[in-house]
Amino acid sequence: MKLYRAIFLCVLPLLLPGSSCSTVRQLPTVADSTRVEIRTETVFQKDTVFVELPRVVERVAVLDTVSHLENEFAASAAVVSGGVLKHSLETKPVKLPAFVDKQIVYRDSIIYKDRVQTMTVEVPRQLTGWQQAKLRVGGFCFFAVILIGLYFLITSIYKLKLF
């Protein structure tokens, strides 16, 4: 029974968490992220628009001897023949200025990209054969192999009846 206690006390520190050391450390991984911010600004600005008047021709006949009509948009001419006044009015082609508020929309988009820079860190020395074997087999499997080996060692010692 003392042999079991001795083996248990030798194996117990190996089973405790934190008693083994690790050569691999996981770095936090951050994915690339993209964020788009869109800004819209509306500005009203005074602008001048020219309105073109259509060309209009109008004729009138009246029983009068004198008629003359003119303004900034039209001119008229009157002719008396056979006691009848023939009068024609013709508009001038003019572009009139009209003031309007012009809407200007400014759209701006800003793209924010977060990137992770990967750095390669050189290891100061190579791993030994023992460390490479431990990394390949893994922690739990390594302890399972040791426990199975101890089990066969202890059973073979009891079969030989050394104790």
Image: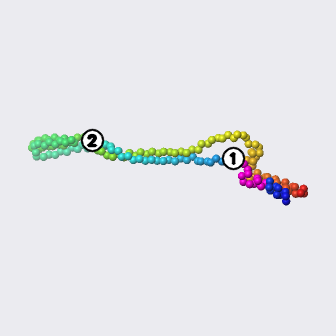
Tell me the amino acid under the disc marked 2: Lys
Q: How is the image coloured?
A: rainbow
Image position, residue 30 (x, y; %): 59, 48
Q: Is residue 112 left or right of residue 144?
A: left
The location of residue 153, given as percent across then percent down, is: 84, 54
Front residue (pair 136, 122): 122
Tell me which residue sits at (22%, 42%) in the image. 73
Q: Give the residues in magenta.
A: 11-23
Question: Viewed as shown, does residue 32 lie left or right of 51?
Answer: right
> Which residue is depicted at the point 80% across and 55% down?
9
Question: Label 2, on which residue?
Answer: 95
Residue with the most extreme right position: 161
Does the magenta-highlighted stretch encompass residue 66?
no
Query: Judging from the image, what secondary structure is the residue with disc 2 in?
Result: strand
> In the rendered image, which quarter is residue 90 located in?
top left
Image coordinates of residue 154 in percent, x first then y, are 85, 56
Kindly state the secondary structure of the residue where label 1 is placed.
Answer: loop
Kind of residue at disc 1: Val
Q: Earlier in the sequence, mark 2 or mark 1?
A: 1
Left or right, 112 with reference to 76: right
Q: Is residue 163 visible?
A: yes
Placement of the C terminus among the 4 image quadrants: bottom right
* Comparing labels 2 and 1, the label whose residue is closer to the camera: 1
Q: Nearer the viewer, residue 40 or 8?
A: 8
> On the picture, is 141 further left or further right than 28?
right
* Residue pictured at 10% horizontal, 43% vertical: 65
Per the model, the C-alpha gap separating discs 2 and 1 is 82 Å
The answer to whether residue 148 shows anywhere in this view is no
Residue at the image position 14 percent from the left and 46 percent from the top: 61
Q: Residues within 10 Å of mark 1 (few under 14, many from 20)?
A: few
Checking the image for residue 24, the label placed there is 1
